[in-house]
Amino acid sequence: MNALDLARWQFGITTIYHLLFMPLSIGLSLLIAIMQTAWFRTGSPKYLAMTRFWASCFCPSVRPAGGQALHRVAEITGSGLSRVELDASAAG
């Protein structure tokens, strides 16, 4: 295998990943928005449960417990966000 073959494999894998996950994420975000709207309009707990389930699949780092992932990212990257700003974003 030469460099050209490896580059073709890399392009193929990247393209397949893009073609699979981009439409999935776009469609899932629309589905979550529709379910959230249905819950807001009807107040039915089944729509809220569906929204929470699919949102947990869609973005696993965002949990009801708050911005723990945001704290970790800020600590790892050394961003200038203060602890107060991070706590405020986690609460709201």
Image (spheres, rainbow, N blue to C red):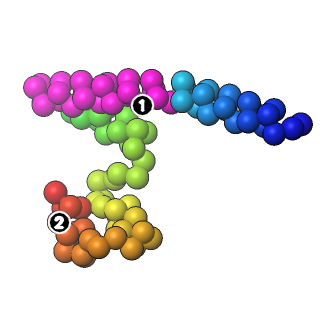
89 sits left or right of 20 in the view: left
Residue for badge 2: 88
> Does residue 59 appear left or right of residue 4 in this picture?
left
* Quadrant for the C terminus in the image: bottom left
Residue 20 % position (x, y): 54, 26
Marks 1 and 2, how far apart in space?
Answer: 28 Å
Q: Secondary structure at mark 2?
A: helix
Q: Residue at x 74, y 30 (%)?
A: 8
Q: Are marks 1 and 2 in contact (CB under 8 Å)?
A: no
Q: Residues within 10 Å of mark 1 (few under 14, many from 20)?
A: few
Q: Is residue 5 visible?
A: yes
Classify 63 as above or below 42.
Answer: below
The magenta stretch spans which residues?
Answer: 21-42
Residue in front for this viewpoint, 65 or 78: 78
- Give the camera-side residue of 41 and 17: 17
Q: Which mark is residue 25?
A: 1
Q: Whole-percent x and y of residue 30?
A: 30, 25
